[in-house]
Amino acid sequence: MGRPSDGVHASRRLYRFEGPYPTRYVGRPHIHVHVTARGFVPLFVTYLPRAGEKRGRFDLVLVPLASRHLEVRDTCSVGDAKTPSDGGPPPPIPARAYFNPHSPERKNLRGPNITGVALTLRGHVYDEQCHPVARALLDFFQADSRGQYDLQEVRLHGHQYTDASGRYVLRTIVPNRYRGRTPHIHVKVQAIRGPILETQLFFPGRLRAYGLNMAALNARDRYFEPATTVHLGAPRNNNYPASFDFVIATR
Ligand code: FE
């Protein structure tokens, strides 16, 4: 695919992109689309062309920053790619209904001994047919504001279950970098009796925390995955709102 500036013609409402059909490297051929506009939540989506598609139409809807709803869409779109794993070996499907997360059940990882830039992450878990997955298990684990993990795996580690609409919310802080890694949050997601998705969530370059140059750190991290970068809102009361929807296999 050519550089976007080679083939994108944008106006207020219309855009056109011309480029060769993407080649396959992981999963189905796809085109990452990143849209930014002043006053709107940046949008990062993946377009999956049909086999041999010559002309496609793909409407992009931006959400105003002032909107209380951060999600770039209310529902998953059929054809959305599954959330990519972080590349490690797929964990075996446990014999029990869920894997053992080895963490406290909680939605709030902040506490009296946790300092840092506050982050509130919300989103949904969907199956591949875009149905919300209720009672999906999510386990989050991350470094603290100094880039250190709790070796006991208790601090800044917690699991929770989605509600009946497939929603989750995590109250935490922005993790710092460590040993050349860009800031990230480890997450495992599993529908009941389904395979485990193990992946990492990243942050867009405009996030400001701990004096980091997030864009440069992302660019240098070979594990960085644009498709698992959270959607970030404007900070309010020193708290960054963010959202990320997972699309997982359920069997
Ligand atoms: Fe890590």
Image (cartoon, grey):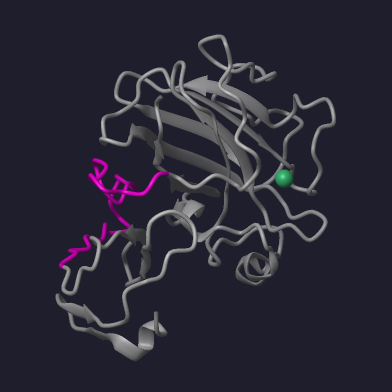
198 or 213, nearer to the observer: 198
Q: Is residue 236 left or right of residue 14?
A: right
Numbered marks: total:
0
Compared with residue 57, is residue 210 higher up or lower down, i.e. above or below?
above
Compared with residue 61, is residue 16 higher up or lower down, i.e. above or below?
below
Residue at 41% over, 23% down: 162
Residue 79 magenta-drawn?
Answer: yes
Quadrant of the displayed image that contains ligand 1? top right
Q: Residue furthest front?
A: 52
Can residue 105 be seen from the camera position used here? yes
Image quarter of the N terminus: bottom left
Determine the image quadrant of residue 18.
bottom left
Residue at 68% over, 66% down: 217
Can residue 235 be seen from the camera position used here? no
Q: Is residue 144 left or right of residue 33?
A: right
Q: Residue 180: x, y in percent?
A: 79, 61
Q: Is residue 102 left or right of residue 149?
A: left
Compared with residue 71, is residue 211 higher up or lower down, i.e. above or below?
below
Q: Residue 108: x, y in percent?
A: 58, 27
Q: Residue 113: x, y in percent?
A: 77, 31
Q: Residue 106: x, y in percent?
A: 58, 20
Determine the image quadrant of residue 141.
top right
Residue at 69% over, 45% down: 116
98 or 112, nearer to the observer: 98
210 or 104, nearer to the observer: 104
Magenta stretch: dominant secondary structure: loop
Residue at 65% over, 72% down: 216
The segment highlighted magenta reads 57-82
Residue 37 magenta-drawn?
Answer: no
Image quarter of the C terminus: top left
Compared with residue 222, is residue 140 higher up or lower down, i.e. above or below?
above
